[in-house]
Amino acid sequence: DRNWRGGDPYTLTTPARSMLVAMRDNRPMWGGIIWTRRWDPGTGKVELGASDWMSYFERRLVLPPFTPDGTTSQVSALTTTFTQVDQNDIVRSLVTQAQAHPGGNIGIVADTVVSGILRDRTYAGHEMADVATALKNLAEVVDGPDIAFGVAPELDANGRVIKTLRIGTPRLGQAGSPHVFETDANVIAWTWPSDGTRMATRAFATGEGIEAGALIAVAEDAARYGDGWPLVEAAASYSTVSVDTTLAEHVASDLARAR
């Protein structure tokens, strides 16, 4: 997080160290971390590649803060456990825990909204699961929360960008009046694609275990067959899931998306 109002361009665009913010009328519209930089001496231009704050948590593991003790068993023994905890609090806790490590705080400020939906989750150290995947898996179960990283519309008292985490209850929805899209006005042309290649009426979700010991959850919408739809199957893997109810939530959500 460098002083974006001025300074040496080379230093200000250092990958993995600096952020990029899109402004409109001095109001932040988007913010993210610069991960790549490409200098073209022929044109004299620098091409930057940036992703929002979620990209940082793709590079962080679900582990409580620890001090390496030099053993090979330390990390495997670490666990992060939630028992009957509001799913929005799980999201906040995963981000807060990641930022509690020395050097790991990038300044994300989370909202305080709760969903009323309680969940159990256990993340074992030996799974080496990254935080972003844990967040996405939680969002993908039935009635899982919407998760959006972004920037506040105003700057803080020091003129710096406020990095935000908004969590749905379970959905964020559209703030303010609905969007209106008008042909020949703000929309020049449009298409309406239909795609049956990802449709399914029966979904499978495989969890922890191998061969005959693997956990496999099934969800099916048999009512569609009477309307002329054929049986179409799809399968997804959730290899770190070892709880039956969690796997059932995943397969139900997969089926809902495949309708």
Image: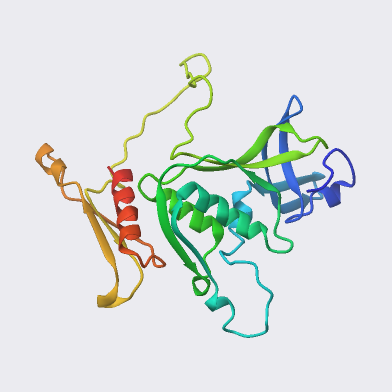
The answer to whether 219 appears left or right of 57 in the picture is left
- Up the image or down, 164 lies above or below 208; here it is above
The answer to whether 229 appears left or right of 120 in the picture is left
Looking at the image, which residue sits at the far left?
A: 226
- Protein image colouring: rainbow
Q: Quadrant of residue 245?
A: bottom left
- Up the image or down, 6 lies above or below 103; here it is above
The answer to whether 218 appears left or right of 138 in the picture is left
Of residues 121 and 183, the one nearer the viewer is: 121
Q: Position of residue 235 (x, y in %)?
A: 30, 59
Q: Position of residue 133 (x, y in %)?
A: 50, 57
Q: Quadrant of residue 241?
A: bottom left
Q: Position of residue 106 (x, y in %)?
A: 71, 52
- Up the image or down, 109 lies above or below 131; here it is above
Residue for point 63% across, 46% down: 52
Of residues 208 and 184, the one nearer the viewer is: 208
The answer to whether 150 appears left or right of 214 in the picture is right
